[in-house]
Image (cartoon, grey):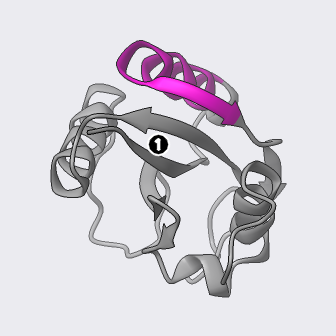
Amino acid sequence: MSNTSVIGLGSNIDPEKNIAAARALLKQEFQVLGESRFVQTAPVGYIDQDDFINGAVHIETDLPLADLSSRLKQLEERLGRQRSVIKHGPRTIDLDVVVFNGQIIDNDFYERDFLRDSVLELIPKLVY
């Protein structure tokens, strides 16, 4: 069975390089249906850090949600992601499932304008 998902991408450690590497890996792993614009955003929560670059990629996959989430964690590790004790701290890459089969599953969609804008750029008729 085929599933569609919107993956949120973010980075504030060498973000141009890490976003490009993440996008390339996603293209290798999944059928990419579209990409949003990538924008510079101020940090949320822990603010004593560099700005982020954020955007989203719309994919198609045969993986169920739990397996997709696990695979994204593996890709984060491959790109040097270190899990910090600082919640919302600096990161090489952050890959999150925001929408799965038309369902919003990440509450950040409602709280972060840049994320909502990226998702709606990819799925303009998404009901939320």
In the depicted structure, whether residue 98 falls above or below residue 35: below
Q: Quadrant of the N terminus?
A: top left
- Would you call the spot at circle 1 few (<14 residues within 10 Å), some (14-19), or many (20 or more)? many
Q: Is residue 92 left or right of residue 81?
A: right
User: Which residue occupies 42% across, 74% down?
Assistant: 105
Q: Quadrant of the C terminus?
A: bottom right
User: Which residue occupies 54% across, 51% down?
Assistant: 6
Image spot of residue 21 (x, y percent): 52, 20
Tell me where residue 101 sits by quadrant. Answer: bottom left
Q: Is residue 94 left or right of residue 121?
A: left
Tell me where residue 60 sits by quadrant. Answer: top left
For the question of whether residue 19 can be seen, the reply is yes
User: Which residue occupies 38% across, 76% down?
Assistant: 87
Chain part drawn in magenta? 17-34
Image spot of residue 90 (x, y percent): 50, 56
In the depicted structure, whether residue 115 falls above or below residue 39: below
Q: Between residue 41 and residue 89, name the one nearer to us.
A: 41
Image spot of residue 27 (x, y percent): 50, 18
The kind of secondary structure the magenta stretch mainly shows is helix
In the depicted structure, whether residue 51 falls above or below residue 16: below
Q: Amino acid at mark 1?
A: Ile
Image spot of residue 88 (x, y percent): 47, 71
Q: Between residue 3 and residue 85, name the one nearer to us.
A: 3
SS category of the residue bearing label 1? loop
The residue that mark 1 highlights is 93
User: Which residue occupies 46% across, 66% down?
Assistant: 89
